[in-house]
Every structure is written in C-alpha cells, then in structure tokens.
Image: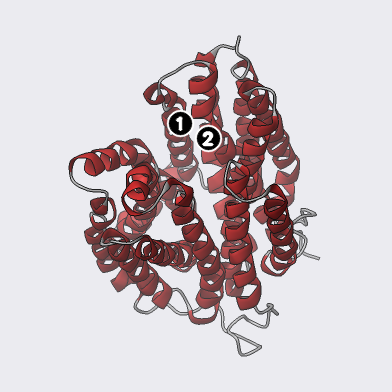
Amino acid sequence: MSDVTAAASTSVREELVGPGRRPVTVGIVLLISLIAFENMGVSTAMPALVADLGSVDLYAWPFVSFVAASVLGTVLGGRWCDTHGARWPLLVAPAVFGAGLLVAGTAETFAQLLLGRVLQGAGAGVQGVAVYVLIAAVYSAAARPAVFGLISSAWVLPSLVGPPVAGLVTDTVSWHWVFLGLVPLVVLAMALVAPAVRTLQPLARGGDGDGDGGTRRPQVLLPATAAALAVAALSWAGQEADGGGAASWVVGLVAAASLGVLVPALRRLLPPGTLSARRGVAAVVLCRGLIAGAFFATTAYLPLLLTDVHGWSLTAAGTPLIAGSLGWSASSAWQGRHPDLARPVLLRVGFAGVAAGAAALLLVTPTWGAAWVAVPAWTVAGLGMGLGFSAISQLLLEASPPALVGANSAAAQLGDGLAQAVFVGVGGALVATAATVALGLSGLVVVVVALAALGVWVSPRTAAPAPR
C-alpha cells in the first residue's frame, strides 16, 4: 500500500470512527439496523399476530399500511430535509417510528395494530431520506463509500438472526415483544445522533424562498398522497387476485384505476427523464429501481423455487438468501475501501453480477435442474448487489445539487419500493398463470435477467453530464 493510499485510508477511518464522529456513525448504522430488524421480525411474527387480532383475509393489510405510509413519508421527508435541513427529521422520524412500535406492541385490536404500522412506515420513510441528507452534510466524498458499506452491513445481522429471534420471541413470550423489544434501541440511536444534528442546516438556501437554491420543484403533497393510496390499492388488488373474495372484474377495475393515479403522480415525484434514462440523476434513480426490482423479486421467490420444485426444507431454502446477504456485505465493504474507483463502472459490474447470478438460476428452475446451483448463483448476485447499490448511493449524492439531495434521495427510495412491488407482483402473476410453478419461475428469471441487462446498458449514463 502506498503512503498516499495509507494516508487516505487513515483519513477516512478518522471521519467514520474518530472521537468526534463515532457516535453519529454508530447512530446511523443503528437507525438502519432498526428498520431491518423490524422488517425481518414482523414478517416472521405476522402469522401469529394476525391469528391473534384478526383473520387470514386481513393478512396483507399490516404490510400494505406500512408501505403506503412509507411512500408518503419518503416524499414529504425529502422536501422537509431540503427546505429545513435534516436536523428535525432525524429527531422526529425515529420518535414517530418508536411510537409506532409502542402502539403496535400494545395492540389489542387490529385497528390499533394498523395505526402502529402507519406510524412505523411514516417514520421509516422520513428517516431513510434524512440519513442520506445527513451523510451528504457530514461526510466528505472520499468517506461516503465507506459509510454506504456500513449501511449495507447493517442489513446483514438482521437478515441472519432477525427471523429466528422473532420466531423464538413469538413462540416463548409474545409477538408483542417483537415490536416492544426494539424501543430501547430507538432511544439509544436518537441519543447518539442528536448531538451531531443540533447545528445541521439545509444544504443550500434559496432563491425562491423555499430553500431550494433557486431550483424549481413542484408541490408534492397531492401526488405523494395519491401515490401512497394507489400503492395501497394495488397491494389490495394483488392480494385479491391471489385468492381473495372480491370479484375479478372489481379487482381489475381497482388495479387499472390505481395505475391511472400512480403513473401521473410518479411523473411529478421522479426526476424528469427517469424513464428515458436521461444522463445524470434521472439515470441513477432508474438504476436504483432496476437493480432493486431484479434482486428482491428473485429473493422473494427463491425459497418457493427450492421448496416447491426441489423439495428442500424451509431452513435449507434460506441458505441462498444468507449467501447473497454475505456477498452483498463483502463487496459493499470492499468498494468502501476504494473510493477512487469510478462508480459508473462499479455499477455496471454490479448489474452484470446480478444478471449472471439470476441467469444461473435457469439451471435450477426446471424440475430436472441442479438445486445446489442456487447457492453460488445467489452469492454472485449478492456480490453484484453490494457493488451496484453502494455505487448508486454515491452517484446519487454526486449528481444532486445541494438543495435537492432530499428530493432526489426520496425519488430513488420511491422508485426502489415501487419496482420491488411491481416485479414481485409480476412473479406472482407468472406463478399463478403458468402451467407449473417451475415454468412460472423460469419466466420470472428471464424478466429479471432482462432488467439487469438493461441496467448494464444504462449504467454509463449515471455519470454526471460533461460541463458545457
């Protein structure tokens, strides 16, 4: 290692864990870990929870209410951070999330549970954007890849231990403690982050009186509300299409109306040129949706592939997911130690890794396929995801004017969530309509490979436009 590289590495390490910076770095990681533990734990505890408070036909609504509230919180949180800085969002959002944990954890009725989930979703949405704005305000460009590596690592432990711990707590104590057990960690995270955000101001102040540095931005309350309601309605339609009690024409009408509301709302909420991959931040936001849709849609159906087609146990079927999480963490940590590498190139390599890992699953999807291939295949996909996702986070901050860091971060997270919902739904439709589960999942893998290949093509457009 050269003296220059060693000095740069030492400088980055000081920025992350030096005496004045360690609390905020630990606080950021803890905030992300809380969202991850909640996500993994609630999914595991949901069958017991619904059996206690409701009935199986209400199973999707705790998830739907969380997603819809997080959509609204993400968009409004981006505007809040841009106009007033990340200080109050970083204090209020964890408090709202913690209140949601308390409300859900003490729920005696299904309505109270849904209220808790709405508060959790709104807090998580605002918090996710505020963390990005905090990173842009506090850490140098050289240190940000390492921060994003830590954020990726914050998902690994919850992915590995969250489901079994939540299952153990639910079986031996009560599902209530899956929520309540996280409350002390929320308090700790707020105590760590609060000193670092006391003096935070908007990244730019502005020419139009709205704190946006003269950059014109549309009003977002109405389209954000419309998008949240449309996502909730689409989720309901997907649930009913999978065996609910509503008539098929009603489901179709609701789905069509939801799309009719969602598409124009997204045109107001996403950067102009997103769908056409305009060079710069629009292409970055598009890549976030492509890589999230490809990776997480496949992750959702891998256990089904291994259990239904190849007869693996549920425990064994989780092995590729663990391998993918470890690969993601390893490559994300590696890129954090190489801030000098071009992020569009890393993103392209990341998409290629996801495409290669997904394509290898075509050797698994047939009934005669080799099921063991899923483990190395999804390890490769995880390695690609760690490179690609971290590169997108860095490129997003590089491509965003200071006054629009919050809005663009919100757009990226919104595209991420919607892409996951859409392509998980596509997978469900293919499985439901195909002659066999194996055939339907083969179709999903082809779709995923096409998404990742499109990402390989779009990746070079994420570089900032050359100055005129």
Residue 375: percent from the left, percent from the top? 49, 21
User: Which quadrant of the structure image shows residue 405?
Assistant: bottom right
| Picture quarter with the C terminus | bottom right
Identify the residue under disc 2: 299
The first of marks 1 and 2 along the sequence is 2
Indicate which disc residue 321 carries: 1
Label 1: few (<14), some or many (≥20) within 10 Å? many
Query: Which amino acid lies under the numbered mark 1 shown in the image of this protein?
Result: Leu
Towards the viewer: 428 or 384: 428
Residue under the point 76% across and 59% down: 466
Would you say the residues marked 1 and 2 are in contact, meaning their CB atoms lie under 8 Å apart?
yes
- Residue positioned most to the bottom: 209
| Picture quarter with the N terminus | top left
Query: Which amino acid lies under the numbered mark 2 shown in the image of this protein?
Result: Thr
Indicate which disc residue 455 carries: none
Residue 71: percent from the left, percent from the top? 55, 63
